[in-house]
Amino acid sequence: MPVHVGRIAVAIGAVLAAAPVEAQGGGAETTVMALVGATLVNPGAPPLPDAVVVVAEQRIACAGTRVVCRVPGGAQVIDVRGAYIIPGLIDAHVHYSQTGWVDGRPDAFDVRAELRYDSTMVALRREPGRFHRAWLCSGVTSVFDVGGYPWTFDLARVTRSATDAPRVVAAGPLLSTIDHWVNLPAEQQFVFMRTDSLVRAAVRAQVAAGAEAVKVWYVDLPDSVRARKRPLLDLAGAEAARTRLPLIVHATERHTAKEALAAGAKVLVHSIESDTVDAELIELARRHGTILIPTLTVLEGYADVYLGRSPSGRYPLDCVDRATRAKLERVLPEPGRRRAIAYFQGGALERQRATMEENLRRLKAAGVPIAMGTDAGNPGTAHGPSVYREMAALHHAGLSIAEVLTASTITAARAAGIASDVGSIEAGKRADLVVLDGDPLADLANVRRVRLVVRNGALHRRADLTPRR
Ligand SMILES: [Zn+2]
């Protein structure tokens, strides 16, 4: 999507310049702020050196050259010469109902004798702040929660205009073709698609609760609904369309992905992992305008946990809260992970990655939009800094740095249905942006060099977002 910083920007800039500005560098009362002198790096546009970004209240009032964007009298001026400004990063696949370690996924490794699952879920619901902070600290200002407990709808409501949390877009409980047991007695994150009427009722309930997408977990396992799986998926797709919500689907095989696309999936939340995509699949994706979220690195997280490695070898942990970090650096007892060790030592990770990369290249070449998503919350994939690893993996798979930045901003915003509000730095959009100490286009690793994060117009120094040790 092209970025416009032209006429509308000038108009709003002029209005601001003429309006009286009350605040003068005074904390919470400051209503107008200008970031001056950095290079502006917007998706789909050439970098703009010596730019001015004017922020008024929660929105971008103007973004462009010093000629286009005059600094309003009385604005708080932030000198960012030598730095780079990018839109706030967006992770289009996360789970606030998962911790980033195995205590949130007892089906992966059972530590319930030590850490009760229900207590863990209560803590997640009560203290989302630790993840909010880790996201902002990592330069991420919006996330798409593509499956979790009903309380994730509350997160979506309260974070929309928050300055101390990323915007959370929530799909809520997911419709599943298997009767998954990782639920709570009184609350479900997996809703088993048992019958037509249940699927209809579930979609209706999601809409009433504030869902921003309908997610189907479309997996083939011995206890899945097998024979009726496809008509139930089609029904979920039709119900989603009727209620004007996008259908998003977990389907990681070629045939299930095709069925998902035929049912109208607007987003595939993972790669096709086991087979290469063919012309029919590509044509279906193009016809439906489907966005692919490859989630290339989530299995690496599982490998780290099972092999007893800290994920710090893959991404920095300084934005991660102490308790989560301690879990991530723990080595689990060996008897419980022997089979997994053999699986990973047998080259499973490398084989899967090669297939996903090949599929990514084919889909990208065919013009299918790619959005960055980590699957954060899964074991070994921490909320926040895991985006750096995923972005590097997208680059390694063949996306240029500019394409990775597009995937991690405006296309991720499209996947989450919020592209009219965020994803690029242009007048009228939310003031969600990141100031970097290095040029991300010269070296993608510079996205890790976060100096400042602006969320809904509020300025955070990275140092203030880092948890105390
Ligand atoms: Zn997921």
Image (cartoon, helix red, strand yellow):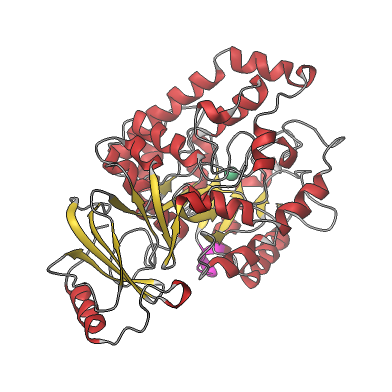
Q: Which residues are magenta?
A: 240-245
Q: Does 242 appear in magenta?
A: yes
- Up/down of 94 relative to 300, above or below: below
Whether residue 385 is situated above or below residue 288 in the rendered picture: above
What is the residue that sits farthest to the left in this orientation? 67
Q: Is residue 78 visible?
A: yes
Q: Quadrant of residue 403?
A: top left
Residue 369 visible from this viewpoint? no
In which of the image's four quarters is ligand 1 placed? top right
Quarter of the picture containing the N terminus is: bottom left
Of residues 36 and 27, the one nearer the viewer is: 27
Determine the residue positioned at 44% across, 38% down: 388
Give the residue displayed 49% in from the left and 19% down from the top: 350
Is residue 432 shown above or below 262?
Answer: below
Task: Pinpoint residue 34: horizontal percent, then vertical percent.
Answer: 29, 67
Residue 435, image x, y percentages: 34, 52
Tell me: 375 left or right of 51.
right
Nearer to me, 144 or 361: 144
